[in-house]
């Protein structure tokens, strides 16, 4: 390495602190000399028994370390908080920004020249990436991969999507207890991320589309030989990224975000990605949002035939060649003026590689745009709809509101046989935004009320300031901003108020007289948080709204001065 290494600030020299640093690294297995020219590569991973999605990462950390060593670097493996979607309550989203802080500060405070981020479950990919982007140290990301698919009643089970479908059938009275229990035993099918195109798969594809992962790394299958090979190759590449001085600031550009938006629409990815990409962009002083998606999306059909939009699983998308195949099909819709961790642009694969899970442009799964934005008097700063998994017959709708002021109230009232609701009712779930809970859980896919489900109703218009799982479906207007806890219009809705949606016109309105709304606003009392200390209190004080990606206001890199990475003073600790 001809350039001075960042880590040399810790390890070079003959004073007592350099000696102490070299000894500390040696005790961890990294033998570093005073004149060492090998880069030290951090390998961040979050394998945890509390997070089955990330369990494959322990083995991949060793594989990445082998790759670093092979390429002439020094690997140092370090743990991070494990954001498991299933068990963390109220939502792993509450801790995404905490992970980003942990990654940023671990990198800042240690002798690390570049980093391999090993991630998998939904929030771990954006959280780790946000932290690394803020350091602007050479970064590569590899995911642990999708879990295998079990068989239930003769067909393969897609994580999340098939659970929600089973729940719908159970609420419709079609599934008895024995079948439900049989499904539970079948559903635990191994470690790795959801095998559908949920948020984890979407974010793995986004990391690759942005240029932070090796080609086809985003669709790798958990436990496969290829997942080990990609981790090793990512370790090797991390050393080269340091040699090339290829930093996130060169990779994360407006063109890279354009490509991410195109791919997000082409795969009908999770609506959560809209938030995560906004937060990722914000760290680099860039922007990403529903207007960009709308602009790009009208030209991008849905190409991937994967649940919840299509019929196959991530394994078939991987067999079809993954992102390079999608990029190849998208052709000129992809901006070539980007640089990725390969050192070159985002490359498209050969069309001969198409499998069943990727369609050609002229025969899409859905015409697009897969994700659409709306605005109006009910959501002045916007809301999003996963149009690809919604019901087009509900895109123009006017119906009376039925309001649930929080999640527990919704769960308690939803199956009340006396609930005044029919299929034209608009279900409103509020108080579930980033400040409200806090952490904006995936509560937005409000179940169809029992008596309507029993009558065969499968979809209704729903409006919420919550998120929903990337594996979910339905005509759900999500991320309504400003949220109710901040006094957004959602806070003022009452049962029976007419709500008007028009997806083609991009509208979401509350049809109530302004004078009446003014009266309600004057009487509105802001909710009082129970969180007086700790991370939730800090989060509530600083979290921004959905259009800003729910990042914390003091983490955003909106000026050059804020983006400057401040090195620690290196001396005695
Ligand atoms: Fe972890 Fe889906 S719950 S990836």
Image (cartoon, rainbow, N blue to C red):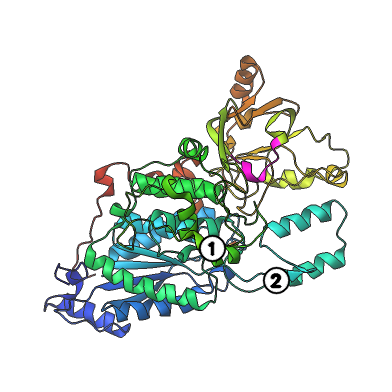
Q: Which residue is drawn at 60% across and 57% down?
A: 89
- Report the front residue among 507 and 309: 309
| Residue 511, above or below 241 | above
| Residue 350, above or below 62 | above
> Which residues make up the magenta segment?
385-392
- Report the front residue among 526 and 431: 431
| Residue 498, above or below 476 | above
39 sits to left or right of 281: left
Label 1: few (<14), some (14–19) or many (≥20) C-alpha neighbours in 10 Å: many
Q: Is mark 1 within 8 Å of ligand 1?
A: yes
On residue 515, the disc is: none
Q: What SS does tag 2 mark?
A: loop
Q: Residue at x 67, y 73 (%)?
A: 189
Q: Badges 2 and 1: C-beta atoms under 8 Å apart?
A: no
Q: Which numbered disc, 2 or 1, marks the residue closer to the eye?
A: 2
Quadrant assignment, res 318? bottom right
Quadrant assignment, res 343? bottom left
418 sits to left or right of 28: right
Q: Which residue is drawn at 71% across and 45% down?
A: 446
- Asked whether residue 539 is in view, the answer is no
Quadrant of picture, ligand 1:
bottom right
Q: What SS does tag 1 mark?
A: loop
Residue at numbered disc 1:
121
Find residue 513 and report its horizontal and vertical position in percent: 65, 16
Residue at numbered disc 2:
150
233 sits to left or right of 228: left
């Amino acid at each position: 390495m001809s350039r001075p290494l960042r880590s040399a600030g810790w390890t070079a020299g003959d004073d007592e602190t350099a000696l102490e640093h070299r000894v500390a690294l040696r005790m961890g297995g990294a033998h570093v000399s005073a004149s060492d020219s090998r880069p030290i590569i951090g390998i961040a991973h979050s394998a945890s028994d509390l997070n089955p999605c990330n369990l494959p990462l322990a083995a991949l950390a060793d594989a990445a370390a082998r790759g670093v060593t092979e390429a002439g670097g020094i690997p140092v493996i370090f743990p991070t908080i494990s954001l498991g979607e299933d068990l963390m309550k109220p939502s792993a989203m509450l801790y995404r920004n905490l992970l980003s802080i942990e990654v940023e500060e671990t990198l800042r405070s240690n002798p690390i020249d570049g980093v391999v981020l090993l991630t998998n479950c939904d929030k771990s990919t954006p959280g780790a990436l946000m932290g690394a982007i803020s350091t602007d140290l050479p970064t590569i990301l590899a995911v642990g991969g999708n879990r295998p698919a079990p068989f239930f009643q003769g067909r393969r089970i897609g994580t999340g999507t098939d659970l929600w479908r089973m729940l719908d059938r159970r609420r419709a009275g079609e599934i008895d207890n024995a079948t439900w229990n049989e499904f539970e035993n079948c559903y635990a099918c191994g470690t790795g991320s959801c095998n559908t195109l949920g948020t984890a798969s979407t974010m793995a594809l986004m990391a690759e589309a942005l240029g932070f992962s090796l080609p086809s790394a985003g669709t790798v299958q958990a436990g496969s030989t290829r997942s080990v090979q990609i981790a090793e190759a990512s370790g090797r590449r991390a050393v080269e990224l340091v040699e090339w001085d290829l930093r996130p600031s060169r990779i994360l550009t407006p063109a890279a975000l354009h490509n991410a938006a195109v791919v997000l629409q082409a795969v009908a990815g999770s609506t959560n990605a809209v938030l995560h990409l906004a937060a990722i962009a914000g760290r680099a002083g860039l922007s990403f949002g529903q207007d960009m998606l709308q602009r790009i999306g009208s030209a991008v059909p849905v190409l991937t035939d994967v649940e919840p939009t299509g019929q196959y699983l991530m394994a078939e998308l991987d067999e079809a060649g993954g992102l390079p195949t999608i990029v190849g099909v998208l052709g000129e819709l992809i901006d070539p003026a980007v640089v990725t961790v390969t050192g070159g642009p985002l490359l498209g694969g050969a069309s001969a590689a198409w499998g069943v899970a990727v369609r050609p442009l002229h025969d899409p799964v859905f015409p697009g745009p897969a994700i659409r934005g709306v605005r109006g008097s009910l959501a002045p700063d916007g809301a999003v709809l996963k149009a690809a998994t919604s019901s087009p017959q509900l895109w123009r709708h006017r119906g009376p509101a039925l309001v649930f002021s929080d999640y527990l109230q919704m769960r308690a009232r939803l199956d009340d046989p006396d609930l005044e609701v029919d299929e034209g009712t608009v279900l409103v779930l509020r108080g579930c935004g980033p400040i409200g809970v806090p952490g904006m859980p995936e509560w937005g896919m409000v179940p169809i009320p029992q008596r309507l489900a029993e009558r065969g109703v499968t979809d209704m218009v729903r409006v919420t300031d919550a998120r929903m799982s990337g594996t979910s479906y339905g005509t759900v207007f999500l991320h309504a901003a400003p949220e109710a806890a901040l006094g957004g219009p959602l806070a003022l809705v009452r049962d029976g108020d007419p709500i008007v949606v028009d997806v083609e016109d991009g509208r979401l309105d509350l049809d109530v007289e302004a004078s009446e709304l003014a009266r309600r606003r004057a009487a509105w009392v802001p909710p009082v948080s129970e969180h007086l200390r700790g991370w939730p209190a800090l989060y509530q004080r600083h979290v921004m709204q959905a259009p800003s990606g729910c990042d914390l206001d003091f983490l955003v890199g909106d000026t050059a001065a804020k983006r400057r990475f401040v090195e620690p003073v290196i001396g005695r600790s």
